[in-house]
């Protein structure tokens, strides 16, 4: 059996002008690429594009990663925008199409941070647009280094996460929004000590999603490499 081809949904940013003359740049953070390679997979970056490209993209890969990034636009979960944020409706639409096609083709999906929020929205759930008013725990941990944990994680019994992390551990945190109403298609599998939902899964459909960033920490936190090994080899 050959290496698993892991599609990583990309982001897009406008170059500052110092290197690429103000051109748009398609990219994915290097942590995903390095962790997938270290786990024995072949990373395959999927640039934002037309929704009708999703079928062909998904047919070329074995598994899909939905990475972190912008906030999900509230229009996709039928709310009015109440806070200023960084949004990309083009990315939202393309990744929703990728997720739909991955499900149709029975391909596993691993979602991180924004990706977990988008997965919940896809299945009909919604989000807290501004998390700070719901908790005193710092979920946007700057200036704590990104590879260092900043809050406790409590995993649910019989979950995929408990197999990897045990009943309790600590993880990093870089999100302003959080899951609110969770879709009935997803099972809550880990929480912060303040009750914020930190992971969901759907074992039969091979879906796993986490709110923190293992891609920031896999080189120094062994469990964060373990989750990439699980995604590439078992999910």
Image (tube, helix red, strand yellow):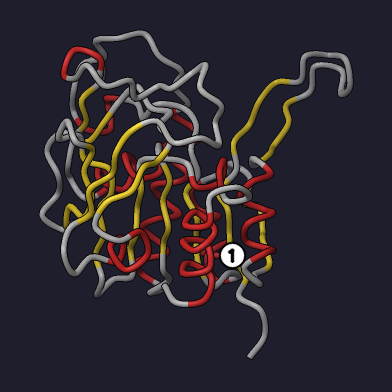
- Residue 36 quadrant: bottom right
Count of numbered marks: 1
Query: Picture coordinates of residue 92 (x, y %)?
Result: 42, 36
User: The N terminus lies in which quarter of the figure?
Assistant: bottom right
Circle 1 packing at 10 Å, graded few (<14), some (14-19), many (20+), is many
For image coordinates 50% across by 32% down, the residue present is 69
Nearest to the observer: residue 172 or residue 46: 172
- In the image, residue 105 sits, relative to residue 46, either above or below, namely below
Nearest to the observer: residue 55 or residue 98: 98
User: The C terminus lies in which quarter of the figure?
Assistant: bottom left
- Residue 108 quadrant: bottom left
Nearest to the observer: residue 93 or residue 200: 200
Tell whether 177 sits left or right of 215: left
For image coordinates 59% across by 36% down, the residue present is 11
- Residue 178 quadrant: top left
Find the residue positioned furthest to the bottom: 1
Tell whether 224 sits left or right of 212: right
Query: Picture coordinates of residue 79 (x, y %)?
Result: 18, 22
Circle 1: element type? strand
- In the image, residue 198 sits, relative to residue 104, either above or below, namely above
Query: Picture coordinates of residue 64 (x, y %)?
Result: 49, 60
For image coordinates 60% across by 75% down, the residue present is 4
Query: Picture coordinates of residue 82 (x, y %)?
Result: 24, 10
Which residue position is annotated with label 1?
6
For image coordinates 59% across by 64% down, the residue present is 6
Nearest to the observer: residue 180 or residue 140: 140
């Amino acid at each position: 059996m050959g290496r698993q081809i892991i599609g990583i949904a990309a982001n897009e940013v406008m170059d500052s002008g110092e290197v690429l003359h103000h051109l748009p740049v398609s990219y994915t953070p290097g942590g995903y690429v390095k962790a997938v390679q270290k786990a024995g997979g072949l990373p395959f970056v999927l640039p934002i594009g037309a929704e009708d490209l999703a079928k062909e993209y998904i047919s070329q890969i074995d598994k899909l990663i939905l990475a972190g990034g912008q906030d999900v636009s509230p229009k996709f979960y039928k709310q009015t925008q109440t806070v200023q944020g960084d949004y990309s409706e083009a990315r939202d639409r393309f990744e929703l199409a990728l997720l739909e096609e991955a499900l149709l083709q029975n391909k596993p999906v691993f979602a991180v941070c924004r990706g977990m929020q988008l997965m919940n929205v896809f299945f009909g759930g919604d989000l807290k647009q501004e998390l700070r008013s719901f908790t005193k725990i710092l979920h946007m941990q700057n200036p704590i280094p990104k590879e260092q944990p900043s809050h406790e994680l409590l995993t649910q019994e019989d979950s995929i996460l408990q197999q990897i992390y045990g009943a309790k551990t600590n993880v990093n945190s870089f999100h302003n929004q959080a899951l609110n109403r969770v879709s009935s298609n997803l099972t809550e599998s880990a929480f912060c000590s303040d009750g914020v939902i930190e992971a969901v899964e759907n074992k039969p459909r091979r879906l796993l999603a986490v709110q923190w960033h293992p891609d920031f920490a896999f080189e120094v936190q062994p469990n964060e490499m373990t989750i990439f090994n699980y995604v590439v080899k078992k999910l």
